Amino acid sequence: MRVAITGATGYVGQSLVQKLLRRDHEVRALARHPESAGTLRDLGVHVVAGAVTEPDAVRSLLEGADAVVHLAGIIAESGRQTFESVHVGGTQVVVDVAGHAAVPLVLHMSALGARASAPTRYHRTKWQAEEIVRASGRPHVIFRPSLIAGPGNAPLKMMVDMIRFSPVVPVIGDGRYEMQPVWLGDVTEAFALALERADLRGTFDLGGPERLSYHRMLDHLEAALGVHRRRISIPVGVARFAAAAGTALPNAAPITTEQLLLLLEGNTTAESAIESRFGLSPRPFAQVAQEICAPFAARPAAAS
């Protein structure tokens, strides 16, 4: 199968590309910065230069494609890269071009919590993108993953670095807000199965096997690193002020106001399709934490 992928140079995209190549699919990738796609070229991927908001680039990407996997998205805005332009405008371009090119299948990555009434523009624009895909009338699959856990995940790397380099770890509020981290390998396997099986169509939540509070996630990461840190609570009001300052001055705070809202809302589902529809045994976060922390974990001293 010839598969066209947007967002192929990203965290999920690079892993999915490798999985599809191992399954003998032909992969074409859209790269906004083609100079960063050398690894994909080395793997034999045909790289098309351009952004997901550029119809000509997307037309080149989808030429002769049997399916398009639309992964491109952002977690924080920067210049012209806004939630509206990327999530909504980019998805509209992909769907329109796929329709004109008669691409048989559209796979789209949304986010758990996407809905019209969401408190964040991130989730609202993800919902708008879903609606564009559904309204296209084309065969489609929409995935809504929770936090995608694996080496290379930026929020988890930030947590690991806090534990490694600080004797005190800050926790916003009470730390009881829950997430349902899902292993990167389970997410990419679901994408591959959806490409290969015509019975897997529709919208699917993807979550791991456990609902974990922020404190429990820190527990697992500390265990994997072999350390224990004291934690201090940061009042939500203080965090909001710092996040607002960080929006205007990016170096002043580690997260934006949008990211703070996403964290405090939590991110869980009672309807994960990983096991029920895709037949996978979801990997527990404790195992994923071991993989993420392996390069940094304390090791016993060598025998003299």
Image: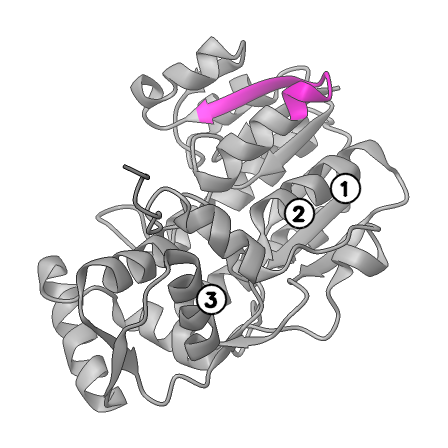
Magenta segment includes 23: yes
Label 1: element kind:
loop
Q: Quadrant of residue 235?
A: bottom left
Mark 1 surroundings: few (<14), some (14-19) or many (≥20) residues within 10 A: some
User: Is 172 situated above or below 180?
Assistant: below
Residue 158, how many percent across, how many down? 29, 57
Q: Amino acid at mark 3?
A: His
Say which quadrant the N terminus sits in.
top right
Q: Is residue 303 magenta?
A: no
| 168 relative to 186, above or below | below
Q: Please, what is the three-letter code of the amino acid marked with disc 1?
A: Arg
Q: Which residue is mark 3?
A: 220
Pick out the residue farthest to the front.
304
Judge whether residue 292 can be spotted in this image. yes
Residue linked to disc 1: 138
Q: Quick one: label 2 or label 3, which is nearer the N terminus? A: 2
The residue pinned by badge 2 equals: 186
Front position among marks 3 and 1 = 3
User: Of the residues under marks 2 and 1, which one precedes in the sequence?
Assistant: 1
Residue at mark 2 to residue at mark 3: CA–CA distance: 19 Å
Q: Residue at left 84%, top 55%?
A: 277
Which numbered dot is residue 28?
none
Which residue range is magenta in the image?
20-30
Out of 254 and 262, give the one closest to the viewer: 254
Sequence-earlier tag: 3 or 1: 1
Q: Are marks 2 and 1 in contact (CB under 8 Å)?
A: no
Select label 2 or label 3 by which is in front.
3
